[in-house]
Amino acid sequence: MAELIVAPAHLKPAAATLSTLLAVASGKSVVASTLTITNIGSATETARVAVSPAAAAIADAHYKIYNLKVSPGNPYMATVGWLLAATDIVRVYSSGGNLVFNLEQMEVT
């Protein structure tokens, strides 16, 4: 029987840098349920979120969220329901470096 491990992914990426929030390990799969983006700064920032299959280099088609405006004190929450396979990568971007990304997920081993 498969074992489920709940392991939320959290990241506050550097400004204007596409960063890895989650890389699914080889031989594993992940069910991602909820994405939260919180602005801990004092000015509105833009967020991007991409899911790249099989460790592929980033491509325009991978973006699930692109240039979403996130204001301070007004977090963005979405039920995503992503089924991620081994080596898939979730990447995030913060325009000013004050966005915190949280992805609630369960790893299937």
Image (spheres, helix red, strand yellow):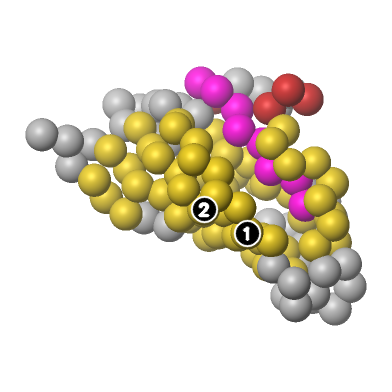
Residue 101 in view here? no
Verify whether residue 69 appears in magenta: no
Pick whichever, 35 or 109, lies toward us. Answer: 35
Where residue 100 sits, quadrant-wise, is: bottom right
Label 2 close to label 1 by CB (< 8 Å) = yes
Q: Which mark is residue 34?
A: 2
Q: Which residue is mark 1?
A: 77
Q: Secondary structure at mark 1?
A: strand
Along the horizontal axis of the image, is 24 left or right of 38?
left
Span shown in magenta = 47-54
Q: Residue furthest left?
A: 1
For the stretch drawn in magenta, the main secondary structure is: strand
Which residue occupies 80% across, 74% down? Answer: 72
Q: Which amino acid type is marked by label 1?
A: Met
**Location of residue 5 with respect to 91 vertically, above or below:** below
Q: Secondary structure at mark 2?
A: strand
Which residue occupies 28% across, 38% down? Answer: 108
